Image (cartoon, rainbow, N blue to C red):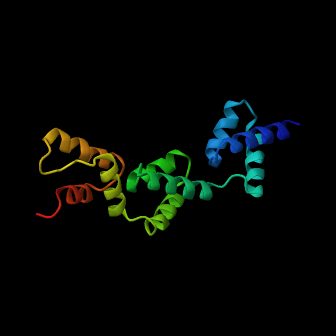
Amino acid sequence: MAGNEVFQAALHLLKVRERTERELEQRLRRKGFAPRNIRSTIDRCRELGYVSDERFARSRARQLLTDGRAVGFRLRRELQAAGIDEALADTVIEELETEFDGEALFEKILRQRFPAFDYRQAQDREKRRVVHYFLRRGFALELVLNRLQGPD
C-alpha cells in the first residue's frame, strides 16, 4: 500500500512538470515517504519512461538557451543545480551548441533587452550594467566586449 501511495505522489509531481530523479526524490522525502519506497518508485518511473534525467536536461537546456537566460558555464550550473550529473550536462550542452549560435543569441538579446544601447556613447556605469548582464547569463567576456565594442 505504501509503495502505491508513493507512486501516486510521484505521478502527481510529474504531472505538474518534468523533474529530475533527484528533484523527485527530494520532493517525496519532504512528503515523509520511506527512502526504500522512494527508490523503488523512482526506478519504476524511470522504467516506464515517466522520469528521464537525459530528457529533462535536453528540454531545460533548450529552454534556457532559447530564452537567453543561460549559456556556457551558467547553463552547466543550472543543469547541475537541477540534479543533472556533470557528464550528462556536458554532453547535452555540446549537442545543443550545434543548434544555437552564441553570437546570434547575443545579438537577439541585445536588440530585445537593450535596443538603444550604444557602447561608444554610453556612460561607464551603463556599460558595466550591460556587460554584467551578459556575463551573468554565461556569455564569455571576450564575446561580450567584441560584440558591444564592434569593429575598431
Q: Can residue 86 be seen in this snapshot? A: no
Say above or below: 146 vs 79. below
Quadrant hosting residue 136 = top left
> Where in the figure is residue 137, as x and y percent of width and height?
36, 48
Instruction: Give the residue furthest to the front.
Output: 116
> Where in the figure is residue 60, as x and y percent of width and height?
54, 52
Q: Nearer the viewer, residue 38 or 101?
A: 101
Q: Residue at x 62, y 54 (%)?
A: 53
Determine whether, in the image, residue 30 is placed left or right of residue 125.
Answer: right
> Where in the figure is residue 126, as x and y percent of width and height?
19, 41
Q: Can residue 46 be seen in this snapshot? A: yes
Q: Residue at x 43, y 65 (%)?
A: 97
Say above or below: 27 vs 144. above
> Where in the figure is residue 101, as x and y percent of width and height?
38, 65
Q: Count the numbered circles shown.
A: 0
Task: Please identify the quadrant where the N terminus is shown.
Answer: top right
Say above or below: 53 vs 101. above
Instruction: Give the residue furthest to the right.
Output: 1
Q: Residue at x 54, y 46 (%)?
A: 82
Task: Please identify the quadrant where the C terminus is shown.
Answer: bottom left
Say above or below: 121 vs 125. below
Q: Residue at x 51, y 62 (%)?
A: 92
Determine whether, in the image, residue 26 is placed left or right of residue 41.
Answer: left
Q: Nearer the viewer, residue 57 or 67?
A: 67
Determine whether, in the image, residue 89 is placed left or right of residue 21.
Answer: left
Quadrant hosting residue 124 = top left
